[in-house]
Amino acid sequence: MTPKSAAIMGAKNGSPFILVLLPFAVLFGVLANQAGLSIEAALGFSFLVIAGSAQFAALQLLTEDAAIPLILLASLSVNLRMAMYSASLVPYLGKAPIWQRALVAYLNFDQAFAVSSAKYQDEPDWSISAKVAYFLGVAAPLATVWYIMTLVGVLVGTSIPQEWGLDFILPITFIGLFAPMLRTLAHLAAAVTSVVVALFFADLPSGMGVLIGAFCAMIVGVLVETWMEKREAR
């Protein structure tokens, strides 16, 4: 597999997510417009942060006049999963040149990670350059769509009817991304734990219930994985 072929394959495999990103990015642009952000601020937000869920969380807190430290903490908490994504990619991309790793780190969002990590598991013999090219092939078109449609959302502003209900796109995106990755008992246990705990703490402010659910899910996942390994070793 050449890097060029890998990049083309990545673009092809990531293309279905464009349909999801289109309304999602427009929605962010619309909400940014309604929150009073200028075109430059909204585009800078998408270009620098390039993390939809964190951007929505920060935007919501901005509209509620929350303190800057709380906004930063909430955004960081929502994006903590990126640290796990990065750690998971080290075995595949850890030996790539530093500028390539920096580019991958910038473009390491949900869709790019999910599609690429699944491909790496199926194609462990690919070269480092092919793996990097595949990742960038997935991520670059999606990032470009995110920037452009953010601009469209800001420009159309409040002309989009609220009854369209575009806010359902966020949960649909996450379900579509990660449901196919629940392949082991540990994955399923972690997923069920996160749902139950997050619902139990749903009334906590600033999305703290989701964070607690994620923390509990990680613990349960590790415990189940450890139990399974010990059971197989017997």
Image (spheres, helix red, strand yellow):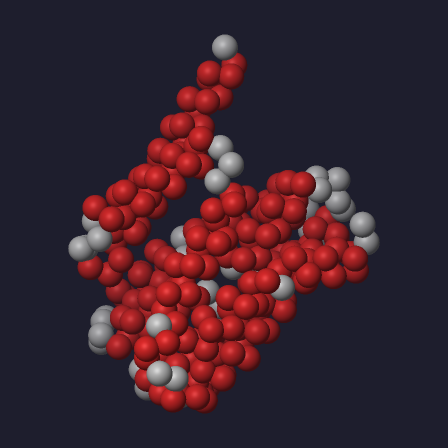
The extreme top residue here reads 234
Residue plotted at (24% across, 61% down): 206
Q: Is residue 135 left or right of residue 171?
A: right
The extreme left residue here reads 203
Q: Is residue 44 visible?
A: no
Q: Is residue 114 left or right of residue 171?
A: right
Q: 166 above or below 12?
A: below
Residue plotted at (30% across, 67% down): 71
Residue 58, percent across and down?
A: 33, 69
200 or 102, which is in the foreground?
200
Residue plotted at (68% across, 62% down): 11
Residue 56, percent across and down?
A: 36, 69
Residue 37, percent across and down?
A: 36, 84
Q: How many marks?
A: 0
Residue 105, percent across and down?
A: 56, 58
Q: Quadrant of residue 142?
A: bottom right
Q: Is residue 135 left or right of residue 46?
A: right
Q: Is residue 223 visible?
A: yes
